[in-house]
């Protein structure tokens, strides 16, 4: 009851409904080139002028299909469905964002923290901490009108997940590819929930260091990404990549649908026909856990050099 009461209090506090009043004074966002077309007047009021949609009125408040939530203003990926949870507060709730996708700023009311799209600055909502609603203890309270949901059949935004040794290098190389929105370091393929880097390093979680790639299928395709993956790491090594040894460094492709499975299977067969002793696992995707913030975009931020190099194999 106390938890529900806190959430209802938040809803009352948040309900400057469909009026400006959030965010920093004079910091209105401009419309961005969007794959979804021009903003409606209602969308402008929230995204550009920092208003708030009415509680329990948004299309995603009680929506839980698997996929990605993009910015309505510019199309950038912001959240994944695995991080969405039921809040009963009137707006969609997420306990994590795609790393680097969301910016936090002090709200004009002096109490709350506003969240904005990291690419275009579009207003999303507010973020709250300490409510103990999920293990991450964070709630992104987001206006549905600021989001567009994209499933794996989308012609604008899809995901691919690969494991090829240390995720720093794999992530850095995928970020450079045309058509890739972003790449995220994390863990997948195991059974431990909310794994930490230290736990994964023990080899007891079953997880591999992996990279989740968000891409525009109008500018690249899964086969291009998969070929690239099989050339930027050594698919013939078992439970290791170079000096990094352990099951967490195994080579694996985690497919999100039948099309990805069939494409990866075809490419792996081609490598075997060429004489490569391929050790890459082909597994169904289950859940991706973002790695700690210090792992994200690590090589660019720290001036490091990737151990991964592209080698022509096809």
Image (cartoon, rainbow, N blue to C red):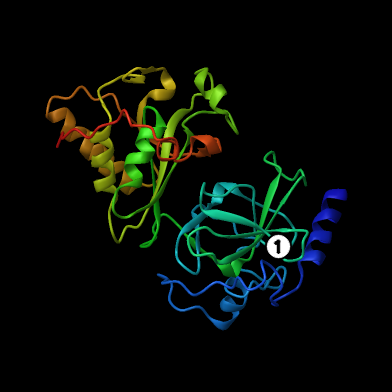
For the residue carrying disc 1, how many other residues have a C-alpha within 10 Å: few (<14), some (14-19), or many (20+)?
Answer: some
Residue at image position (64%, 71%) is: 50
Q: Residue at x 40, y 33 (%)?
A: 168
Say if 297 sits above or below 273 in the image. below
The x, y position of residue 238, in whole percent, is 32, 19
Residue 106 position (above or below residue 234) = below
**Side of 10 relative to 51 (left or right):** right
Drawn side of residue 52 relative to residue 205, left or right? right
Residue at the farthest bottom position: 41
Please say if 156 is above or below 268: below
Q: Which residue is mark 1?
A: 107
Q: Residue at x 72, y 69 (%)?
A: 55
Residue 121 shows in this picture: yes
262 relative position to 172: left or right: left
Q: Find residue 17 and report its image quarter.
A: bottom right
Q: Is residue 291 visible?
A: no
Total number of numbered labels?
1
Residue 49 horizontal/vertical position (percent): 62, 75
Q: Taking 28 as reference, is 298 left or right?
A: left
Expressed as whole percent of the image width and height from the top left, the position of residue 57 reads: 68, 71
Screen quadrant of the C terminus = top left
Of 183 and 109, the residue lying toward us: 109
Coordinates of residue 112 in the picture (x, y in percent): 74, 58
Residue at image coords 33%, 31%? 306
Using the image, determine if residue 204 lies above or below residue 79: above
Say which element carries label 1.
loop
Residue at the farthest left position: 274
């Amino acid at each position: 009851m106390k938890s529900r009461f806190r959430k209802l209090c938040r809803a009352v506090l948040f309900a400057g409904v469909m009026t400006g009043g959030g965010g920093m004074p004079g910091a209105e966002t401009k419309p961005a080139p969007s794959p979804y077309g021009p903003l409606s007047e209602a969308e402008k009021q929230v995204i550009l002028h920092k208003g708030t949609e009415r509680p329990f009125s948004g299309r995603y408040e009680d929506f839980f299909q698997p996929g990605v939530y993009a910015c309505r203003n510019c199309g950038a990926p912001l959240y994944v469905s695995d991080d969405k949870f039921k809040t009963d507060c009137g707006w969609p709730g997420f306990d994590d964002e795609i790393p680097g996708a969301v910016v936090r700023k002090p709200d004009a009311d002096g109490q709350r923290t506003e969240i904005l799209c990291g690419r275009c600055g579009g207003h999303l909502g507010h973020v709250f901490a300490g409510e103990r609603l999920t293990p991450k203890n964070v709630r992104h309270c987001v206006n549905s009108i600021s989001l567009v949901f994209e499933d794996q059949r989308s012609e604008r935004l899809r995901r691919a997940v690969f494991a090829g040794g240390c995720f720093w290098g794999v992530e850095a190389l995928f970020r450079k590819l045309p058509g890739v929105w972003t790449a995220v370091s994390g863990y997948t393929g195991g059974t431990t929930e909310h794994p930490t880097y230290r736990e994964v390093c023990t080899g007891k979680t079953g997880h591999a260091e992996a990279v989740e790639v968000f891409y525009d299928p109008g500018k690249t395709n899964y086969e291009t990404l998969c070929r690239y993956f099989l050339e930027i790491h050594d698919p013939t090594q078992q439970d290791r990549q170079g000096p990094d040894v352990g099951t967490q460094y195994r080579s694996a492709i985690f497919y999100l649908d039948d099309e990805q499975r069939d494409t990866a299977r075809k490419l792996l067969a081609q490598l075997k026909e060429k004489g490569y002793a391929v050790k890459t696992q082909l597994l169904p995707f289950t859940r991706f856990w973002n790695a700690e913030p210090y792992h994200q975009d690590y090589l660019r931020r720290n001036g490091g050099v990737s151990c991964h190099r592209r080698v022509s194999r096809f």
